[in-house]
Amino acid sequence: MRDLSRRSFLKGALASGAAVAAGAGLAACSPASPSASAEDTQKSDGAATATEGGRWSWSKKPEPITDFVETYDADVCIVGLGAAGAPSAMYAATHGLNTVVLQKGNAAISNGWCANAINNKVWLESGGEPFDTGELYADFAEISNGRDNGKLVMNFLNRGGEVMNWILDNTTELTPVVVEKGQTLGWYVDNDFSTRYAQYAELLKLMGDKAEAAGATMLWDTPAVQLITDESGAVTGVIGQNKKGEYVRVNTSKGVLMACGDISDDEEMLECYAPLLLGVHNMHGAPNNTGDAVRMGSWINAQITPAPHALMMHFDPTWLPEGNAPFSGIPWLRVNKKGERFGNEDAPYQGVVQAVAAQPEKLAFQITDSHWMDHIDDMPNPNSHSRETADPANDWAKAVKGGAIIESDTLEGLADAYDIDKETFLATVERYNELCEKGVDEDFGVKGEFMGYNAIKEPPFYAIKRAPGVLATVGGLQVEEHSRVLNNDGDVIKGLWAAGDCGGSFYGHEYPMVLPGGSIGRGFILGVLSIKDMMDDFDSVTA
């Protein structure tokens, strides 16, 4: 079995302080007690059940929609055509299910580029050793803050390779490459990393096209707006609204799969469930992730992931106009606009990003000198966003030329370039160099061997601006092991599944880099497994 030590796994884990930092969002988002009166509910920090009204725009359940321009009778309705919806639609349609897809946009849309699938055939056929999924889960459980459903995560880990292999067999027009030590697949053009986003978009389009060719009905520009339930509370369909404002009804005999993304494009939802992301630059080209599953689910008493929802906030890709620079995870000195050092630069990646988000103007600057390349292989931050590069000298030169890295013969020149407080900055560098000479970081505890490499003494000097960007949140409708949505009593809501970033019961307080590509991967795998569950075929090998 492939060896993956607990220490190396936990190295990519996330800082545990997010729950405290985001605590302001907890009370306001907690559902009121089912036994509380409306009057009592309104007194509790503005929180309310969906039927009683309250602080949030979705707190009051709307009246049922009854006027439709068209009605569809289907086996399955898939809400959203992204990382979970596209492969699920392809699986459902190619297995003979009458499938309707409600998509908010006019194409398949998903943010990202790689998908985690443990023990996929590309890895194994390349000679890679199988991963021990029990060991993986033991470490994942240690960092998930007790918020995951272990059976659900184990289904993802144990069935990932199998489901991914089916996807690969049915998308042979595009060839993936192994990334991230074999856990993860990415799709590039001619192995060019810069094409990863465009190629991933092509993959989703291909899956959607194959679903449509197999008979799926695609209702473009028709977002879902309301779930349909019967007297027992079971979901029997979903209502969409087209560009004309007209409503269409989709009746389902087997189920509805919510696959419509997260809450990160809706500021009110962020205030409620992920306040740490407020004010952080959003990276979405199409702002479709407006918490539709949370909104509709709350109206039928679905259980919502308690705040804070796990967040995905990265430096890479960057929204800065000067573009990306390599090595965002390297533990060089980081200073803020005041010229102050503010934390341990070798903390897990997501923790470093959050620390930067707390700085003035939500900016920080990595500082190094002419010896930047001497030890980059000795001090990588082991996560998927260290911006590793096969040609560091060339990529560095491109970043300098493009302005993503500032080069100066003096430290004062770096301070001037970014309007950093010069006096404080120079004092910070002087103190940092003292610590490097000692080989002991008395201020923030960076490993001594790293400090020994990092002294900033010989020109030219370099500064790299780093600014966080919002990629996603990863929490939504709480589910059991088969991705069936639960109600607030912990019982299954018949006829309703959730997968991808609108599904909960998976992550802790933050998105861990220890399962790189996990957000897209769980969309792929758990989405397809949801369809299999609707077919009463969950336990069979995906084929």
Image (tube, helix red, strand yellow):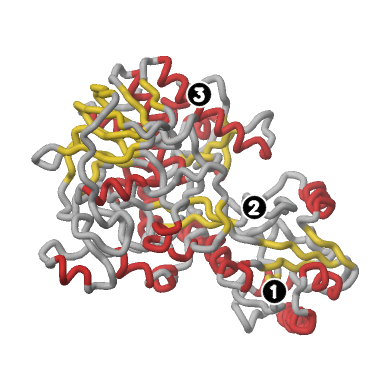
Q: In this view, does 298 lie to the left or right of 103?
A: left
Q: Can residue 132 be seen in this view?
A: no
Q: Which of 251 and 66 is in front in this view?
A: 66
Residue at the spot of label 3: 206
Count of picture labels = 3
Nearer mark to the viewer, of 3 and 2: 2
Residue 166 falls in which quadrant of the image? Answer: top left
| First of labels 3, 1 by sequence position | 3
State the separation of the CA atoms marked 1 and 2. Answer: 19 Å
List x then y, in percent, for residue 385. 60, 53
List x then y, in percent, for residue 317. 62, 49
For image coordinates 34% across by 20% down, the residue present is 93
- Under mark 2, the amino acid is Trp
Which label is found at residue 319?
Answer: 2
Which label is found at residue 81?
Answer: none
Category of crowding for the residue at label 2, using alpha-carbon neighbours closer than 10 angstroms: few (below 14), some (14–19), many (at least 20): some
Secondary structure under tag 1 reads loop
For image coordinates 67% across by 39% down, the residue present is 193
Depicted 333 relative to depicted 485: above or below: below
Depicted 373 relative to depicted 416: above or below: above
Category of crowding for the residue at label 1, using alpha-carbon neighbours closer than 10 angstroms: few (below 14), some (14–19), many (at least 20): many
State the separation of the CA atoms marked 3 and 1. Answer: 45 Å
Residue at the spot of label 1: 337
- Under mark 3, the amino acid is Leu
For image coordinates 37% across by 68% down, the residue present is 25
Q: Can residue 218 be seen in this view?
A: yes
